[in-house]
Amino acid sequence: MEGALAIVGSLGIVGGTLFAALYVIEKQSKEPLNRQIERLKETIREKDQELKSARADVVKAQELAKENDLYRKRYEDASRDILKLERALELRDGQLESFMNVAQRQIAYLESQVRDLQKPE
């Protein structure tokens, strides 16, 4: 009977040791996985922040694009107005030049009449 008890005791020790070894192995295999899970969670948090920042940049870019479209329209209108004013100025310059030519001819004519009147008879 003592032999059987010794065998059962030895089996108990072996079983306990085996259980302890399995527990340590399981814990050791979980620790790297838990660390990896934590690293992945941190990566997810970082990527979420990057995504929020990128979304904010997209919204800002869309607002700037809308503002740019408004300015583009105003620029096109102003360009058309400038062309109209340049044409009007050219027309005025042409009219002024014509007026100056007529005025010079009239002055020359009046000067010739004054000279004719100043001649002694």
Image (tube, rainbow, N blue to C red):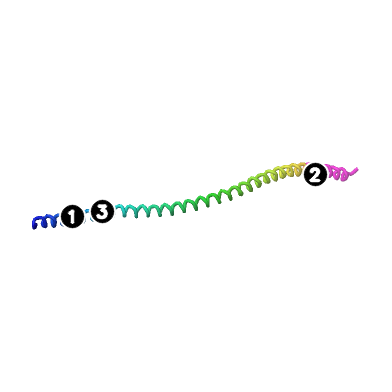
**Residue to which mark 1 is pinned:** 15
Q: Which residues are magenta?
A: 101-121
Q: Quadrant of the C terminus?
A: top right
Q: Amino acid at mark 1?
A: Gly
Other residues around mark 1 within 10 Å, as few (<14) / some (14–19) / many (≥20)? few
**Residue to which mark 2 is pinned:** 103
Residue ranking furthest to the right:
121
For image coordinates 74% across by 44% down, the residue present is 92
Q: Amino acid at mark 2?
A: Ala
**Callout 1 touching callout 3 (CB < 8 Å):** no
Instruction: Please name whichever residue, 2 or 94, is drawn nearer the observer in this view of the structure.
Output: 2
Spatial CA distance of label 2 from label 3 is: 111 Å
Instruction: Please name whichever residue, 56 or 115, is drawn nearer the observer in this view of the structure.
Output: 56
Instruction: Please name whichever residue, 96 or 113, is drawn nearer the observer in this view of the structure.
Output: 96
Q: Secondary structure at mark 2?
A: helix
Mark 2 or 3, nearer chain start: 3
**Residue to which mark 3 is pinned:** 26
Magenta: main secondary structure? helix
For image coordinates 45% across by 51% down, the residue present is 51
Above or below for 52 versus 97: below
